[in-house]
Amino acid sequence: MSNNFDMITTTDPVYTVSQLATACGASRSGILRLQEEGILEPSGHDASGVKRMYSFLDMMKLRQIVMLHNYGFTHATIKEYFEDNGNYTNLISLLAAKQSDIFYFMKEMELRMSEDHGLEIEYVYSPAVPCHTMKRTHSFPYYDQHRDLIIQQMADIVAKKYVLSTTRPLFLTTPWDDLAAGASIDDEREFVGCVPLAEMPETPDSAVVMSPRKRVLSMLVHGPRIPMDDIIAKLKHEIEDHNLKVCGPLYLISMVGPHLGLDIPKERYLARIMLPIE
């Protein structure tokens, strides 16, 4: 586009950055940041060559940018969308994942308020998510141990300037094969702490891995803590009854609990236990 206000046609309305911000519900600094990132360039400048001026089409583009941002898309994704000539394929895929997040968050909120306690079996798909990981070897990690691991992980995440996912819960993984064979989860064993991130870092980091999309046998555990032996026994029973093949570790997903800083009654604690299956 032209970089000179004199080159803009007289029939095309022009707006200052402040006017554009007001009309589209954006901030002036936000619009200037979009220019810095190469997402929204002004159509020209005023006669002095200093003041940025925007056209009607710039306004329509900013309106779309604000809409995409309100749906949770990052600037990088929005820029990619415009560079790909408005191809919605990637956006649709991301929106489907967000829709799944909303569905499970609503279900989690309903369960928090439920007076029913116990174990609930489900078959669901767990979406792909980048995770910061850290390994520890110890007996089954109760709340204090998991909190200590999370504290160490968060310190590393902050130091590396990673962005946390605000929709995916924290979780642990541990091998399943020996548990299926009768080993006790209270024995010394390896646990991997996983803290979901908003996106994969640009620079490769061995501590950050992509947890793949997978079909899982899922068990919701709500109410006061239920012994892990009972949970594992129920999982084994479900696997045997339906001739399922387990193809990954046991996932211990923290949803609501004291180690997450949530001040709620014990009867509303909530966790999800998952096993990837074929």
Image (cartoon, rainbow, N blue to C red):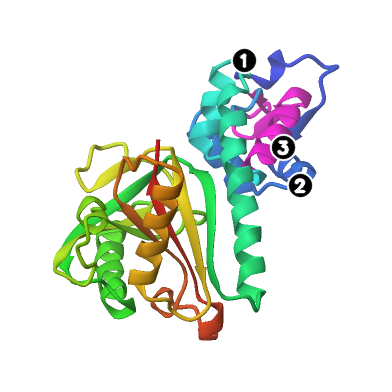
Give the number of callouts: 3
Q: Position of residue 275 (x, y in %)?
A: 38, 50
**Is disc 3 surrounded by few (<14), some (14 to 19) or many (20+) residues within 10 Å?**
some
Q: Secondary structure at mark 3?
A: strand
Q: Nearer the viewer, residue 14 or 88?
A: 88
Q: Is residue 1 in view from this perspective?
A: yes
- In the figure, 68 relative to 173: above or below? above
SS class, disc 1:
loop
> Is residue 90 rendered to the left or right of residue 239?
right
Above/below status of 256 relative to 135: below
The verdict on residue 26 being magenta is no
55 magenta-colored: yes
Mark 3 or 1, closer to the camera: 1
Which residue has dot 2 on it? 22
Q: Nearer the viewer, residue 57 or 203?
A: 203
Q: Say which element carries label 2.
A: helix
Mark 1 is surrounded, within 10 Å at the Cα level, by few (under 14), some (14 to 19) or many (20 or more) other residues, namely few
Three-letter amino acid code of the residue under disc 3: Thr
Write the start and end of the magenta stretch as one range.
44-69
Query: Is residue 180 rendered to the left or right of residue 97?
Result: left
Q: What is the number of the mark on residue 9?
A: none
The residue located at (62%, 29%) in the rendering is: 92
Front one among 75 and 147: 147
Q: What residue sits right under mark 3 in the picture?
A: 16
- Label 1 sits on residue: 1
